[in-house]
Amino acid sequence: MHDSSQRGRSGRPLVSVIVRTKERPELLREALASIAAQTYSPVEAVIVNDGGVGVAEIMDDFLSDIDHIRYIHQS
């Protein structure tokens, strides 16, 4: 059973995609492009940065294409 708080405006369940990254900006960009290309909505991307640089800048490129992006930074 799905909690109604985990549903988007469409009433459909929220899908979360968790991406762990460190020092692989080209793969992060590819993963975010894949998430943005999905036809299902609502989708959130949870990006876990394990100390890499430039991750926030890459995420900025996809802010308008993905319903919600959460960013967790581990230094």
Image (cartoon, rainbow, N blue to C red):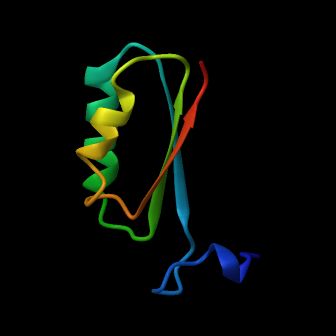
Q: Position of residue 70 (x, y in %)?
A: 52, 49
**The one of 37 and 46 positioned closer to us in this rendering:** 46
Q: Quadrant of residue 36?
A: bottom left
Q: Position of residue 5 (x, y in %)?
A: 68, 78
Tell me the quadrant of the picture where the N terminus can be found.
bottom right
Horizontal side of residue 40 vs 10, given as left or right: left
Tell me the quadrant of the picture where the C terminus can be found.
top right
Which residue is located at x 39 percent, y 64 percent?
Answer: 67
Q: Position of residue 71 (x, y in %)?
A: 51, 42
Horizontal side of residue 17 vs 60, given as left or right: right
Q: Is residue 13 above or below residue 69?
A: below
**Residue that sits furthest to the top in the current view:** 23
Which residue is located at x 26 percent, y 60 percent?
Answer: 64
Which residue is located at x 45 percent, y 62 percent?
Answer: 43
Q: Is residue 25 above or below residue 36?
A: above
Q: Number of numbered discs present?
A: 0
Q: Is residue 66 above or below residue 20?
A: below
